Image: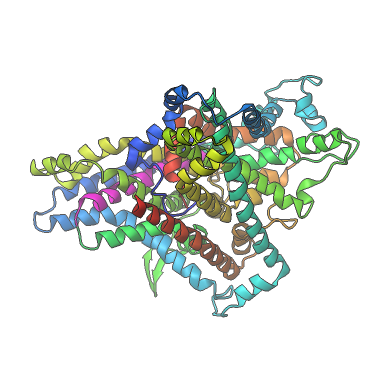
Amino acid sequence: MTTADLINKIVQVAAALAIFAAVIGLILFLIDKAPKRGRDGFQLVAFLAPALLLLGIGLIYPAVRTSIAAFADNTGNFIGLDNFVWMFTQPDALRTLANTVVWVVLVPLVSTIIGLAYAVFIDKARGERIFKALVFMPMAISFVGASIIWRFVYEYRPEGREQIGALNQILVWFGAEPVLWLQSDPINTLLLIVVMIWVQTGFAMVVLSAAIKGVPTEQLEAAQLDGTNAWQRFRNVTVPGIRGSLVVVVTTISIATLKVFDIVQTMTAGNFGTSVVANEMYNQAFRSQAPGRGSALALILFIMVLPIVIYNVRILRQQREIR
Amino acid sequence: MSSSVAPADLPVPGRSDRDDTSYELAQEGATKTKRVKQRLTSRGATIAALIIAVVWTLPTFGLFVSSFRPEDEIRNNGWWTIFQNPGFTLANYQDVLLSSSASSPQLGSYFVNSLAIAIPGTLFPLVLASLAAYAFAWIKFKGSNALFILVFALQIVPLQMALIPLLQMFSLGLRFGETQILPGLPAGNYAQVWIAHTIFALPLAIFLLHNFISEIPGEVIEAARVDGAGHGQVFFRIIIPLALPAIASFGIFQFLWVWNDLLVALVFSGGTPDVAPLTQRLAELTGSRGQEWQRLTAAAFVSLVIPLIVFFSLQRYFVRGLLAGSTKG
């Protein structure tokens, strides 16, 4: 990077920020100077229009276009359900769908269980804050960074050479042969899932930890006086008390998992039978120049997300009514 | 991180007292329950927690240690043998950041790109969302509720749904029939990435900021209005200062989201050193030079350093933003 490049980039950013600030400032200044008649209308438009226009042009309209393109071939001719027939008959595409199901079952389940267990274990323990930070940290870093971290763990060296990947070293210590993890179907999908679990557990833990602290101590004490053991108290007092948060955690992680793209892309680029819908959507649309299939996959993604969201909304509504 | 309906049950900036207390009660709760003295946890639980903490930390730690090891050592033995095979060098960082040789990742310019994308990519949606949130909260108009619900519902649209048409629109402009409404955007600069990030951030940002802005006491705003302040002045003088904590905590979250993003960058940046951010470069390197661990380890840490600084210095706000933003699409 030359200094000229750097200056050019700084100028770009500064200019964009300056123009943006000037436009917004001008709008805010002008709307208070607008003629008295119809001023409220002007003001409303000035406040709302920028965001709504962007959403309309940049999200709603494209989403509609994508939904239509899902029923068209790559040149835009209507072909009915062909893209979906492809998706549900071709072995590769079916594998992609199956992998996505495995992801969306395992990731929310395992990360919520580990997150919950960890939150309970460290609750009120000494050094709780540090314990939390350690598990929570992966949440701050990028999926790409996380993928590199784990690729290093899975790294392979042929037998006889010293291993540099921790997982294979453990195998070797136990006398087994090292494995080319990321190329070994089907275990490679599970190893990618581990990365996602590693990231999402921190989220589950923080939300559930906050919820656990909200369970009234009185209830726990009462249960204790009744002679229950720790597991019974956890099962019958804590879990019902944090049910709402559990639902939120599971659904949120499920949706994040359905859309997982970066991990698969960075670890295997979807090769060796590891592809998932979000990754395949990108590959079809932007690598294979098949926007029709890409759109169909995007639509499937949307349809898979929908029931989870509806369920989430219903649960939240019920809880509000109970309160 | 993901998109769903915002968890009304979770602490969002709008319900500020709840989240602060629940997260910080970690300490206070400890003293409060000390009189009970009967713990749910046991020795076994502590050990289990320790194991989880170690397993969660070691992979990052290993990469970090390796990034300071000489190339020969990284290649030939594990980082856990560092005491048998000692060696410390900053050459890896020097190579990935500063070297201008063709084989080096030359991360310097990508680092600048990441910043150049993330700063406006955070500020633009925050400002536009605050404006819209104010209008939804404090300007009465017909259909306000329906419109707000529509914006709220947009959170569930995966951004994959918008990628292909949006990219077309950026290159060809927006047409309605034969008439060109908007011209296309020139490629090779940040504009496309900024706009894409702004659009994808808006639904959640509007929703969360609305929660907060609508809870500002009405009397304050009424008083200013009676004194003759217009909506513009009210927004600038009252709303922005009062909502700043919420705006800031969402801002941190959005910054990290943009900094860590790969998909939007891949689709809209064009992949040149002029525009592409660190994440994109890293993904590329793992594909093409997946074996050059002396570079990958250092490069990964170059990309992690900003999020980690943000995380460790602003953890409280980060947690708040995350709890609120656990719904990002």
- Quadrant location of residue B320? top left
Q: Is residue A307 left or right of residue B122?
A: right
> In the rendered image, is residue B189 in sight?
no
Judge whether B77 appears above or below B132 on screen: above
At 80% from the left and 35% from the top, the residue drawn is: A170
Q: How is the image coloured?
A: rainbow
Q: Is residue B180 left or right of residue A148?
A: left
At 39% from the left and 59% from the top, the residue drawn is: B153
Query: What's the magenta region?
Result: B113-140
Q: Position of residue B119 (x, y in %)?
A: 43, 39
Residue situated in front as seen by the camera: B275 or A29:
A29
Q: Position of residue A293 (x, y in %)?
A: 60, 69
**In the image, farthest residue toward the right:** A160
- A204 in magenta: no
**Magenta: predominant secondary structure element?**
helix
Residue situated in front as seen by the camera: B262 or A207:
A207
Judge whether A73 appears above or below A277 on screen: below
> In the rendered image, is residue A281 in sight?
yes
Residue situated in front as seen by the camera: B302 or A117:
A117
- B125 in magenta: yes
**In the image, farthest residue toward the front:** A226
Q: Position of residue A27 (x, y in %)?
A: 23, 49
Q: Position of residue B156 (x, y in %)?
A: 45, 58
At 21% from the left and 37% from the top, the residue drawn is: B237
Classify the position of the N terminus of chain A by image quarter: top right
The number of callouts visible is: 0
At 71% from the left and 28% from the top, the residue drawn is: B66
